[in-house]
Image (tube, helix red, strand yellow):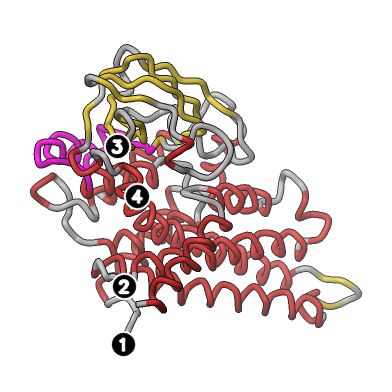
Amino acid sequence: MNFDFSDDQKYLRDEARKFLEAQCTIAEVRKVLDDDTLGHNAEVWQKVVEMGWLGAAIPEEYGGLGLGMLELCVIAEELGRVLAPVPFSSSAYYFAEAVKLAGSEDQKTALLPGIADGSFIGCLATTEGPGAISESAIRAQFRDGKLTGTKLPVTDGDIATHAVVLAKDGGASCLVVVDLRQDGVSRKTLKTIEPTRGHAEIAFDAAPAELLSSGAGNGMVALDQILNRAAVLLAFEQLGGASRCLEMATEYAKERQAFGRPIGGNQAIKHKLADMYVKNEVARSNAYYGAWALSTNAAELPEAAAAARVAASEAYWYASKENIQTHGGMGFTWEVDCHLYYRRAKLLAVQAGSPAVWKEKLVTALEAKNAA
């Protein structure tokens, strides 16, 4: 079986890389890092919107390009390479997929075109503090079309216009969609290890909300499906960052001279780079398997998504850490870009669930498969 991308998808990747390397430089990333008032780079975001990438996996009848999930995987990897400081994942991986999976026809018609053309920014609000997401941990309440409760941290919650929120409707979990620009919603920006991606605490005080049809009474089931899909896309974003870390470390090892020769000639550095390469390739193999399962809606998606998430989180963390080590003392400084990738690696590792959560999911999926 050939898991590689098609020629058209490779062309999309190449063009996306050229565009992002020109329009989303590290200088653009640092603009957000250096300004505490910014949660994203609005100029870069507008350029991404104009490329139409937000609608890559949104059907044409809802204003999207109708390309597919594989194309979205390609774009995700390239965004990860440049540390794009934009709310793309929140809008395209989480919010759009939640509406596509759990929304009614009317909700899809009302919301998806806004995501595709960039007039809406979406986010997913599930957690209410530390710990894994569970039925018993949900405190937010949805009653009579009103939502009350607090969610934190919410990625891109400081700039989002709409949110899909996990709540309780009576004794059952549900998913509701909320316009964050209306009365009854208040937000507080949170500080994290990665300032180039904004986070917020969002409080709902009898805020008008609308139940997502397929998320009624089985919100946790619907959320699990959404996270499985997002996990594959996040794995590609992590893979892009890990690949760039390996490139940075290799380039520096060839240029940096010590005792009259490049440090890349030292066996310890060679082994370090080789280990980074191996972990990246393992992550790529799992990500490609996940992309296949995602694009075909295969029954193997839960295990493929978990495997991709675990491998990509490990690869990115290791590559970002060893990139700093390869750069030596300079790698720890503010001026060198290594820490930017380390920050993003740590952030992405805990989005949509920590590696420990996904390892548990992988074990559970494999046990269920073997028992069948």
Residue topped by disc 1: 1
**Picture coordinates of residue 92, whole percent (x, y):** 32, 47
- Residue at image location 74% in from the left, 80% down from the top: 270
Q: Earlier in the sequence, mark 2 or mark 3?
A: 3
Q: Which residues fall within the magenta stretch? A: 102-124
Amino acid under disc 3: Leu
Asked if 259 appears above or below 19 in the picture, the reply is below
Q: Residue 292 carries which label?
A: 2
Amino acid under disc 4: Tyr
Quadrant placement of the C terminus: bottom left
| Left or right, residue 224 beside residue 245 | left
Q: Earlier in the sequence, mark 4 or mark 2?
A: 4
Amino acid under disc 2: Trp
- Residue at image location 50% in from the left, 68% down from the top: 363
Q: Which of marks 1 and 2 is nearer the N terminus?
A: 1
Marks 4 and 3, how far apart in space? 16 Å
- Residue at image location 51% in from the left, 39% down from the top: 197
Q: Which mark is residue 93?
A: 4
**Picture coordinates of residue 314, whole percent (x, y):** 60, 64
Asked if 170 appears above or below 69 in the picture, the reply is above
Number of the front mark, 4 or 3: 3
Quadrant placement of the N terminus: bottom left
SS at circle 2: helix
User: Is the residue marked by circle 4 packed among few (<14), some (14-19), or many (20+) residues within 10 Å?
Assistant: many
Residue topped by disc 3: 175
User: Is the residue marked by circle 1 packed among few (<14), some (14-19), or many (20+) residues within 10 Å?
Assistant: few
SS at circle 3: strand
Asked if 47 appears above or below 265 in the picture, the reply is above
Marks 2 and 3, how far apart in space? 27 Å
